[in-house]
Image: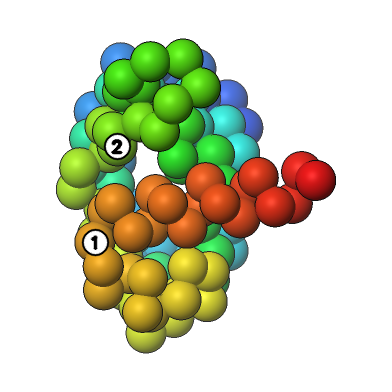
Amino acid sequence: VLRRLPGTIGSLTSLETLILRRTNLIELPGTMGELRRLTTLDLMECERLNALPYSLCDIATFQAPLVRGIPALTNLLIDDTFMQSPPPTVISEGIQGIYDFLNLNRVASET
């Protein structure tokens, strides 16, 4: 039973699609942000996963250094029934809303 991904997943820098649908994951490692080519992440029906790591907003194409990026992760499939962070209202806004939520909360947690 898969409950956690190894932190070394971040070393799979050519990974473009990651399907974790219906797994028993309880968390995603912070190294997920190192998957710079990841365009699809499927977390549907992951009933035990209730939060996304802030590092997911690192998967972005930056327009300029330290300027808001464009999410490279364009297909994020998550089930808002189980998710607490981001909340369902943010999930309904789509990938840009999720990206902004994670980025803002990461900045807030660092101060």
Left or right placement of residue 9 versus residue 15 in this view: right
Question: Residue 80: x, y in percent?
Answer: 35, 78
Which residue in the rendered view is the most extreme toward the right? 111
- Residue 10, image x and y in percent? 51, 25
Which residue has dot 1 on it?
Answer: 94
Q: Is residue 96 visible?
A: yes
Kind of residue at disc 1: Gly
Q: Residue beneath label 2, please? A: 71
Observer-nearest of 51 and 102: 102
Q: Amino acid at mark 2?
A: Pro
Q: Residues within 10 Å of mark 2 (few under 14, many from 20)?
A: many
Q: Is residue 60 above or below residue 53?
A: above
Q: Quadrant of residue 27?
A: bottom right
Q: Residue at x 38, y 57 (%)?
A: 98
Seen in the picture, residue 43 relative to 17 is either above or below; the reply is below
**Marks 1 and 2, how far apart at CA:** 11 Å
Quick one: SS at disc 2? strand
Up the image or down, 64 lies above or below 94; here it is above
Q: Foreground: 73 or 96? A: 96
In the rendered image of this protein, does residue 23 appear above or below residue 55?
Answer: below
- Image colouring: rainbow
Q: Earlier in the sequence, mark 1 or mark 2?
A: 2
* Residue shown at the point (26%, 73%) measured from the top left: 92
Q: Nearer the viewer, residue 101 or 67?
A: 67
